[in-house]
């Protein structure tokens, strides 16, 4: 027997807000978190804007001890803040360090690039001049891929599986899918799931080198992230963490806790780098299969999908994504459901993207609104037929189902279907 | 630098690593760094690196392994700088 899976808690630290109410307000108001980053100008980046959570030093002192912070890079700090918020939002209190283990909760928190900032700034300067002896004990726990989940597991005393996944820009959504599968199979009652990514030029430099970042909007940061726009010229890097508490419905009901939404289904696949797919581009058939697979598991029809929260990064892939959604739903472009891109406000959070955006999806369902997608007043010529489906300004939403997808380098895809909980 | 000055420096260097803040309020030469002050054993490496930097000394791994208490550290450092 498969178990129904619901969302009972969320935590978010995003470039445009920390905490659910601040994030919701920012989404509703269309407040961008993209800012000019002087360090990127100094380092001669083409793209000198990014989405970075604000006031983190002040926030982190409320969450972590001085001893914790000795071995926490920004990626771990973001995951820790969002994870503690998520746990508390689900009705649990952040435990003392000598508490009992919570054997019924695990975590799968993904990251895309991981602790490269720690490697470059702290470890390499010593190792490369023969001073490996002076590296100290705090490097491994910050650069191991699982740093983000491992630290949170210790802070909360989690006793279920605690792990990290990584699948480029699909990471956060894939983590939610994997947690969904585990709970659905009855392997565990609760999983904290989502993604996290640090804020650092070295995390973003490879993308700048690839010329996939927007270099044209350095003087207009809030207009820099332009998904679905004719003047889109690449994505804007983002960062932060978005995490959700996924829980077995029976467990949630037994606890009498608030339920935000139900996850009807999840699907993860790849396009095999065939049929136009490559390391950096999706095989459209893979995308369509991924979305359709999720819809099939959810036992819903195209007409049941009330809105789409796309991957939509502001690259040349946006028109193809809209076409893929239409194909997957077997509708004409004019009939594509309402669509928005959370990246228009927070940038592309890489490994955090699916987490940040899924928190937005669940907030929209629960609070009955669709946030506006910024900076696409000039809709891309190849999306014109679907132009009326784009949500430009925040509107009320009475729909029940939102489909979320993420696509990543490596030709990997993840789709999630959420239903409002009434 | 006399023993008291060394002791004060050692206590200051260990403070950020001490998870048992209550025990740290009663810190003394006899305090066991791991068991009493709640320092994570992996962090002894970092504490010794801080000693090396602060006192401009080199502490061999074998000598570092023998540090159990605050007093052990003070004694070791005092011998190195004398």
Image (tube, helix red, strand yellow):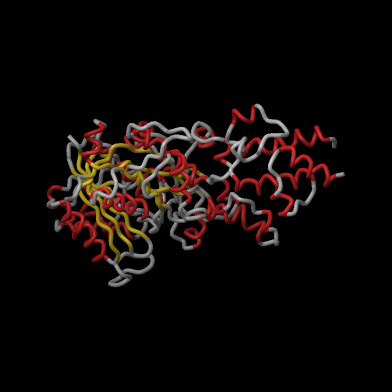
User: Measuring 13% from the left and 51% from the top, which residue is drawn there?
Assistant: A300
Depth check, front residue: A102 or A359: A102
Q: State the image coordinates of residue A69 (x, y, percent, origin top left).
A: 56, 40
Q: Write the residue at 45% across / 41% down.
A: A80
Q: Residue at position x 70%, y 62% from top?
A: A130
Q: Is residue A266 left or right of residue A121?
A: left
Judge by depth and name the residue closer to the eye, A124 or A226.
A124
**Residue nearest the observer in this picture, A306 or A296:** A296
Q: Quadrant of the C terminus of chain A?
A: top left
Q: In the displayed structure, does residue A266 sit left or right of residue A352?
A: left
Task: Give the image location of residue A294, x and y in percent.
Answer: 21, 55
Q: Which image quarter: residue A168? A: bottom left
Compared with A317, A195 (above or below) is: above
Single out the residue that lies furthest toward the right. Answer: B82
Is residue A17 something that shows in the picture? no
Which residue, as the protein is rendered here, is positioned at the far bottom? Answer: A274
The tally of labels here is 0
Give the image quarter of residue B69: top right
Q: Is residue A26 visible?
A: yes
Horizontal relation, residue B49 to residue A384: left or right: right
Left or right position of A366 against A165: left
Q: Position of residue A77 (x, y in %)?
A: 49, 42
Observer-nearest of A284 and B80 = B80
Q: Quadrant of residue A192?
A: top left
Point out residue A56 in the picture as x, y percentages from the top left corner.
51, 37
């Amino acid at each position: 027997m498969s178990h129904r899976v619901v969302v009972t808690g969320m935590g978010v630290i995003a470039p445009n807000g920390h905490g659910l109410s601040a994030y919701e307000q920012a989404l509703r108001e269309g407040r961008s978190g993209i800012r000019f980053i002087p360090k990127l100008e100094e380092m001669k980046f083409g793209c000198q804007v990014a989405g970075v959570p604000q006031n983190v030093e002040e926030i982190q002192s409320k969450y972590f001890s001085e001893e914790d912070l000795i071995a926490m890079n920004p990626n771990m700090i973001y995951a820790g803040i969002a994870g503690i918020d998520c746990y508390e939002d689900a009705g649990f209190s952040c435990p003392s360090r000598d508490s009992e283990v919570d054997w019924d909760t695990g975590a799968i928190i993904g990251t895309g690039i991981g602790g490269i900032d720690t490697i470059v700034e702290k470890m390499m300067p010593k190792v490369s001049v023969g001073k490996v002896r002076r590296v100290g004990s705090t490097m491994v726990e910050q650069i191991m891929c699982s740093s983000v989940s491992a630290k949170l597991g210790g802070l909360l005393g989690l006793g279920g599986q605690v792990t990290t996944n990584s699948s480029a820009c699909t990471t956060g959504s894939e983590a939610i899918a994997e947690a969904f599968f585990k709970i659905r199979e009855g392997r565990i009652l609760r999983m904290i799931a989502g993604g996290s990514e640090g804020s650092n030029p070295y995390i973003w430099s490879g993308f700048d080198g690839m010329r996939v970042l927007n270099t044209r909007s350095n003087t207009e940061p809030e207009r820099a992230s332009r998904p679905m726009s004719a003047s889109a010229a690449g994505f804007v890097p983002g960062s932060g963490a978005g995490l959700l508490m996924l829980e077995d419905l029976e467990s949630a009901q037994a606890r009498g806790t608030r339920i935000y939404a139900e996850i009807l289904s999840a699907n993860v696949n790849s396009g095999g780098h065939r049929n136009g797919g490559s390391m950096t581009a999706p095989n459209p058939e893979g995308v369509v299969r991924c979305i359709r697979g999720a819809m099939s598991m959810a036992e819903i029809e195209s007409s049941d999908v009330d809105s789409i929260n796309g991957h939509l990064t502001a690259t040349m892939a946006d028109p193809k994504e809209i076409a893929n959604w239409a194909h997957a739903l077997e509708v004409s472009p004019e009939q594509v459901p309402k669509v928005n891109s959370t990246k228009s406000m927070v940038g592309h959070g890489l490994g955090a993207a699916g987490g940040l955006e899924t928190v937005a999806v669940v907030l929209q369902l629960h609070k009955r609104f669709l946030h506006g997608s910024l900076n696409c007043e000039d809709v891309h010529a190849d999306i014109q037929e679907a132009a009326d489906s784009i949500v430009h300004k925040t509107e009320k939403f009475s729909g029940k189902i939102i489909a979320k997808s993420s696509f990543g380098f490596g030709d990997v895809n993840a789709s999630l279907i959420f239903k409002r909980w009434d | 630098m006399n023993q008291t000055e060394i002791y004060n420096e050692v206590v200051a260097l260990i403070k950020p690593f001490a998870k048992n803040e209550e025990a740290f309020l009663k810190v003394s030469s006899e305090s066991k760094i791991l068991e009493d002050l709640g320092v994570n054993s992996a962090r002894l490496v970092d504490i010794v690196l801080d000693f090396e930097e602060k006192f401009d000394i080199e502490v061999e791994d074998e000598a570092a392994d023998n540090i159990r208490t605050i007093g052990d550290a003070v004694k070791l450092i005092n011998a190195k700088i004398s």
